[in-house]
Amino acid sequence: MLPRSTFRCLLLLAGAVLGSALSAADTPAGKDVRLNRVIERTEKKEPVFGIFSHNVSTRTGAAVGSSSIDFVIIDLEHSPYDVSRLEGYLLAMTDKRQLIQKGNLQPNVVPIVRVPSAGREQLVFVIKQVLDLGVFGILVPHIDTAEDSLAAVRAVRFPQRRGVPDFKPEGLRGVGYGWPARYWGLTGAEYGERADVWPLDPKGEMLLWLMIETKASIDNIDAIARTPGVSGLFVGPSDLAFSMGLPFNDPEVEAAIAKVAQAGKAAGVPVGTLTGGAGVKQRLEQGFQFLAVGGDSSVGASVQEARRAAAELRKKSK
């Protein structure tokens, strides 16, 4: 057992370290830092890399949160929709050592959730429950029309104050931000200001990615891409091929994927997709800016693959 004096000194030292970190977070450099690192890098025209996570558990969340990838898409579409498990996953992603070393509130890995409801279903409550746990982004599957994309934007946004330039599309999200504000490390008022969709709100920290994965979505891609409040278009290559009645590698499917990239470029909206390591170079050359490289069925291998892809590209860009 430690002597009481030694124990007291250790407590004082721990308090000093934590206090220093918290003070850094309260400074303009710490508090006003861009919290969403994917947005930060996208604004610099840097590609970002991540993985899909299907194992919604605390240990997986911890492993992913301390990894070197840029984002994780936590999949609640093809995994059980259990917000309690999601809550544990998100809490486990918090790496205190990283935050202390950085001296600000920006997490290294940005959590984005693929919700289970398709765009045409417009289940506002599903998006609200996920947002209220503190995620930094929503991925909505099966967006087929501009009406679907508009409904997704409205579900993610809080109602805006009168007179602001980005008042529309009018938000539908209910106000109950005590928990997500705590998760972000902000006051409720600060969270209310910053939890808006980027780039419609240039200071917004929320990403809204829409999945383009049906023949209908390809037919309507220009209108979908031009919807105010959309942060990115995410091509789902498997569902897209199925919807078109074609094999995955059919040239017509590839032409449809290229059409999404072109529509995103024309509208000024980033475009992403799921790919293996071998496809990273091709997709980047096509103009894709965010790539999910594998999943957590083998977290270590997928993280390393995404990390190698990112390192190779950033080395070439210097």
Image (tube, rainbow, N blue to C red):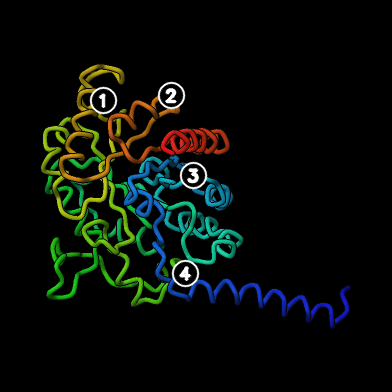
Q: Local crowd at mark 4 within 10 Å, few (<14), some, or many (≥20)?
A: some
Q: What is the distance, in whole Å, between disc 3 and disc 4 at their CAs?
A: 22 Å
Read off the residue under disc 3: 69
Residue shown at the point (37%, 57%) measured from the top left: 136
Q: What is the distance, in whole Å, between disc 1 and disc 2 at their CAs?
A: 22 Å
Please tell me whether residue 281 is drawn above or below residue 145 in the rendered image.
above
Query: Of residues 164 and 180, which is closer to you in this image?
Result: 164
**Residue 119 coordinates in the image, percent (x, y):** 21, 46
- Answer with mark 1 or mark 2, whichever residue precedes in sequence: 1
Read off the residue under disc 1: 242
Read off the residue under disc 2: 278
**Residue 127 coordinates in the image, percent (x, y):** 30, 56
Q: Local crowd at mark 1 within 10 Å, few (<14), some, or many (≥20)?
A: some
Read off the residue under disc 4: 30
Q: Nearer the viewer, mark 1 or mark 4?
A: 4
Please tell me whether residue 31 is drawn above or below residue 209 in the rendered image.
below
Q: What is the distance, in whole Å, between disc 4 and disc 2 at their CAs?
A: 38 Å
Three-letter code for the amino acid on which mark 3 is drawn: Ile
